[in-house]
Amino acid sequence: MSLFATDRPAPRCGWPFVRRSVPAAARCAVVVYLIIGLGWLLTRATIGWNSVGVPASAAQDASIPKLHDEVQPADTHHPAPLASPEQHLRRAQIAHCLSVYFEKPVDADRLRPWSMMHGLIAYGQRSQLRVGGELVNAAEYLCLNGAGNNVRILSWDAGRLDAKIGPGVQGHPGQLLAILAQAGVPADHPLAVDGQDLTLVDLIEYEMRGCKSKTELTFRLIALTHYLEPHSVWVNEAGEKWSLARLVSEECQQPIEAGACGGTHRLMALSRAIRQLEEHQIPLTGPWLQADRITNAYEERAWRYQNPNGSFSTQFFNGTGRDADLTRRVYAHGHILEWLAYKLPENRLTEPRLLAAVDYLVHQLMTAPGLEIDVGPRGHALHALAIYYQRAFGESLDAEQLRAVAHSVPATERIPAQSAKAVALPAAEPHRPAPSPRPILRRR
């Protein structure tokens, strides 16, 4: 017997609870509207919408705010309690440290672009610079080729883009693009140079053309693994065929210790290349497998030379070291932790030796006299904490949310910031290299 068996004719829409007195057309219209409404609710629940009906994911991928644009205040953030009271306190300590240093932006009127880049690296697209007494978005200012102490990185010469390398500008080929990549600035973001309206793609192509064998390729590898697909192939300025595989191979052949900052940047570049393949679920073979062996070997060295107080060796990977100079300690420790916080898988982020390293760095930064540490070491140390904070706790680097997390524990449990006035001037590092079809861009 039919489920709808009855003495009266079955309703045309198939719903026995719809009154027969309602016209059939109206009943069907109700069904259509219900289906549309249900679909809309499911879509909203799945991807989220902002106030103007744009998918939230698209809103998050929008380009960084323009100069002087006001950043919308963050929603009130109530951090969820963690299972471990120790991790709950650690999260608050890191957030407190990051929020305190966020209020100390690099002064572009006094310091040059090398310092501005290190002011950008810690907080990514949320980083700020002080220009003419006003706070501006650091990533946007660098993309506008803004000056630092009347010096600029980019220029337009004889119809071609050029990126300067030397004191006060880039310390290494590809450094600007590498820092913008780590900040997640999209490839199609506008780039303004000497009146030319360009995009970041032009800088990407410039660095691709500049690849040359047996030169420092560390920062180009960091940048290009972010913006290009894993199997991208291109031609450099000399007409030679290049690929990410060749870049990885070239870097594997270079001595780690000869690389910038004790070799930590080269290790970071290799680790980012490995992570790119893992994200694409591509097995590690050839140069990537070699990179994996190298990074694992140097990770073991870092732990071997770690000091009992949690600090990493001031000799980097060349033996034990515990320099008395604060800047030297933060410089070495911050760079090594920055790399390890990125390299280690999530299930190792609570290893006691890593937690000891994180706690040590927070304490060094918060107890530094006047909170004055040279811009370069400070930038990488804060970036190390930012990487760990985001990976271990999934928290935002928004200044208001950092303060909210910091205040989730009593003030007496937070490390008080030291106060005093001082001036920190960075050191710059020199180097110089040589300038295809459009690159295959990774959309992020």
Image: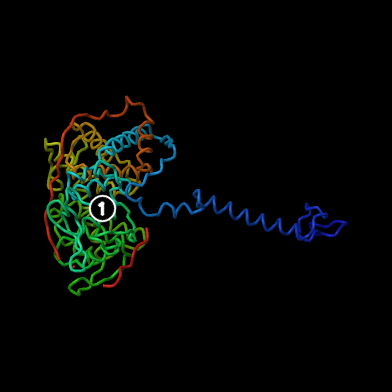
> Does 188 appear above or below 383?
below
Q: Position of residue 224 (x, y in %)?
A: 27, 61
Task: Name the quadrant of the N terminus.
Answer: bottom right
**Residue lying furthest top:** 412
* Residue hosting label 1: 142
**Residue lying furthest bottom:** 239
Q: Secondary structure at mark 1?
A: helix
> Does 366 appear above or below 21?
above
Q: Quadrant of residue 132?
A: top left
Q: Position of residue 47 (x, y in %)?
A: 50, 52
Front position in the image: 143 or 46: 143
Three-letter code, disc 1: Leu
Q: Position of residue 275 (x, y in %)?
A: 31, 56
Q: Is residue 48 left or right of residue 123?
A: right
Q: Position of residue 137 (x, y in %)?
A: 30, 47
Q: Quadrant of residue 353?
A: top left
Residue at image location 26% in from the left, 44% down from the top: 129
Mark 1 residue crowding within 10 angstroms, few (<14) / some (14–19) / many (20+): many
Task: Name the quadrant of the C terminus.
Answer: bottom left
Number of marks: 1
**Residue lying furthest right:** 7
